[in-house]
Image (tube, helix red, strand yellow):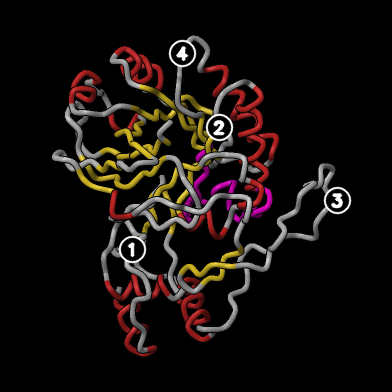
Amino acid sequence: MKIAEIAVRVLDLSRTGSDNPFADTDSEAVLTLFDHGILFGTVVDGQNLFYPQQSITRAEISAIIWRMDHLGQPTPDPNPDPKPEPDPKPDPEPDPDPTEYFTWGNHQIPIASKIPVNSYDKTLFQKNDKGYITYESDKYTSRIGIDVSRYQGEIDWKQVKDAGVEFAIIRLGYRGYGTGKIVTDTYFHKNIKGALAQGLDVGVYFFSQAITPEEGAEEARYCLNALKGYNITYPIIFDWEPYPDSYDARTKDLDDSILTQCAVSFCETVKAAGYQPMVYANLTYFYLHFDMTKLADYPFWLAQYSAKPTFYYHFNIWQYSSTLEVPGIEGNVDMNVHLIPRS
């Protein structure tokens, strides 16, 4: 934290944004350095973490000094694409204008023109009397939802329903970051049965650690098999997140083009089975890691913990908090709002 304060003072920087991308700090200095592309954080379970209590490593401070020295200059891609191999299925309609960009912090982000732009009216995202966000307009209505996993423990789904929750996205399983083994969430069956019994609409997400497109498809098939006998009406969602370097995860330094292929492989396998796929990510991964031109066919579940969503593209579900409380669940829970077009 002290390093951030010194850097801001030396460089005479000020904030260029209003959102807080971090779940564990609201330091003005840290947020300022994020706005200018000097600090990024580490995404863990959908949260961008700064780890304010941890000591800074020599590698981290070297990276910060380099970015400070190159402030205002073009930032090289930390994960450059390898020499491209021939695409067996070239896109028949390439992005017609790949030179258009929008600005995010210190980054110039190429626009994926096939994806609709976010047209929601920010002023219409409002909190109801329970503190849950809703959205109503002449074009959209909304539904209140949560996402849960074994970390919420035993859930009283009747209380959840009575509290006004209308849908639940349940973690079906995950792939081990070290072993690569696929595991079913220990509360998956209990949670999906409990939610369905109360008449909630249900979708599922899989916490992926795929490192090849084949593994992405394998994870999708695992979900499809586990869902036999369950009537889900919400999507099957691809959720890929990184681990800190200290974990020595098998996904460390995965090339962004391979990550995108994993997501597409997962989604196409889900779609082929007659279900709705979806991709979950935060701003960092949507903007800096996924090739958005390849994700144009899938709806997005946005993770952004802020008062209003600022995502450039259209999204269907917004995960806006991980610290709210819902009757029937002990402790905090992730909250979501689903934006639904009016017919």
Between marks 3 and 2 in the image, the one whose residue lies nearer the viewer: 2
* Vertical relation: 342 (above or below) 261: above
Dot 2 alpha-carbon crowd within 10 angstroms: few under 14, some 14 to 19, many 20 or more: many
Asked if residue 244 lies in the magenta stretch, the reply is yes
Dot 4 alpha-carbon crowd within 10 angstroms: few under 14, some 14 to 19, many 20 or more: few
**In the image, farthest residue toward the top:** 229
Residue, disc 2: 277
Point out residue 234 in the picture as x, y percentages from the top left corner. Answer: 45, 26
Amino acid carrying mark 4 in the image? Tyr
Q: Earlier in the sequence, mark 4 or mark 2?
A: 4
At x 67% / y 36%, what residue is drawn? 265
**In the image, farthest residue toward the left:** 129
Asked if residue 234 lies in the magenta stretch, the reply is no
Amino acid carrying mark 2 in the image? Pro
Residue, disc 1: 19
Residue, disc 4: 230
User: Which residues are drawn in magenta?
Assistant: 238-258
At x 28% / y 15%, what residue is drawn? 198
Q: Earlier in the sequence, mark 1 or mark 3?
A: 1
* Vertical relation: 241 (above or below) 67: above
Give yes or no for contact between labels 2 and 1 (Cβ–Cβ under 8 Å).
no
Task: Give the SS element for disc 2.
Answer: strand
Point out residue 93 in the picture as x, y percentages from the top left corner. Answer: 76, 49
At x 68% / y 44%, what residue is drawn? 261
Give yes or no for contact between labels 4 and 1 (Cβ–Cβ under 8 Å).
no
